[in-house]
Amino acid sequence: MTSSYDSNNIFARILRGELPAHTVYEDADTFAFLDIMPRGDGHCLVIPRKPARNILDADPDSLAAVLRTVQKLSRAVMEAFAAPGVTVQQFNEPAGGQVVFHLHFHVIPRFEGVTLRPPGTMEKPEILAANAQKIRAALVG
Ligand code: AMP
């Protein structure tokens, strides 16, 4: 069975400007913003503008554009947080750990010996705003 794309998923609504986001980067094909329940400071999500449920139905050109932005953001979060490493994660379908059904890549700065925080804890808006600003600054710098 092929699962379909729901145009009212949370990230589609963020793309349409119906829900707020702490935007860190955008271009013609991709959009990047902070995860509101970060597994680490500076945890970003990168999504294509073109609707795709996940990696299984994504248009290859859109996927290529997303990965270009993932690379850009990986470098930017490492610089912004002086992190020696970065973790990129991507989940597909409920059995694969996917919760929001618009294709997205997680980009998380990492530090030696520091584990990811457990999922599900909402970050304070002022901390998200400050972290987004740091990443935007690294992208222009
Ligand atoms: P997953 O589908 O498992 O890759 O996880 C979806 C991710 O989206 C989780 O890390 C959530 O914290 C994150 N998330 C859910 N709602 C929002 C939102 N409104 N803004 C930013 N991130 C969100």
Image (cartoon, rainbow, N blue to C red):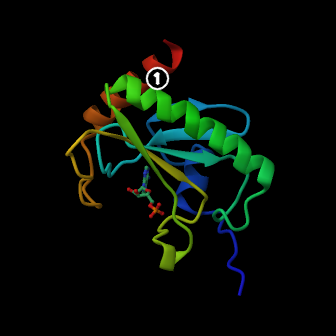
Q: Residue at x 23, y 51 (%)?
A: 115
Q: Position of residue 18 (x, y in %)?
A: 55, 48
Q: Would residue 21 be found to the left or right of residue 5 on screen?
A: left
Q: Residue at x 61, y 58 (%)?
A: 103
Mark 1 — residue? 136
Q: Position of residue 121 (x, y in %)?
A: 24, 56
**Circle 1 — which element?**
helix
| Residue toward you, 9 or 105 | 105
| Residue toward you, 35 or 63 | 63
| Residue toward you, 18 or 59 | 59
Q: Residue at x 71, y 87 (%)?
A: 1
Amino acid type of the residue tagged 1 in the rendering: Arg
Q: Would residue 2 be found to the left or right of residue 42 on screen?
A: right
Label 1: few (<14), some or many (≥20) within 10 Å? some
Residue extending furthest bottom? 1
Q: Position of residue 16 (x, y in %)?
A: 63, 46
Residue extending furthest left? 113
Q: Quadrant of ligand 1?
A: bottom left
Q: Would residue 7 be found to the left or right of residue 90 on screen?
A: right
Q: Residue at x 69, y 46 (%)?
A: 49
Q: How many marks?
A: 1
Disc 1, ligand 1: is the CB inside 8 Å?
no
Residue extending furthest top? 141
Q: Position of residue 133 (x, y in %)?
A: 39, 23
Residue 138 image-quadrant placement: top left
Q: Would residue 100 be found to the left or right of residue 85 on screen?
A: right
Residue 85 image-quadrant placement: top left
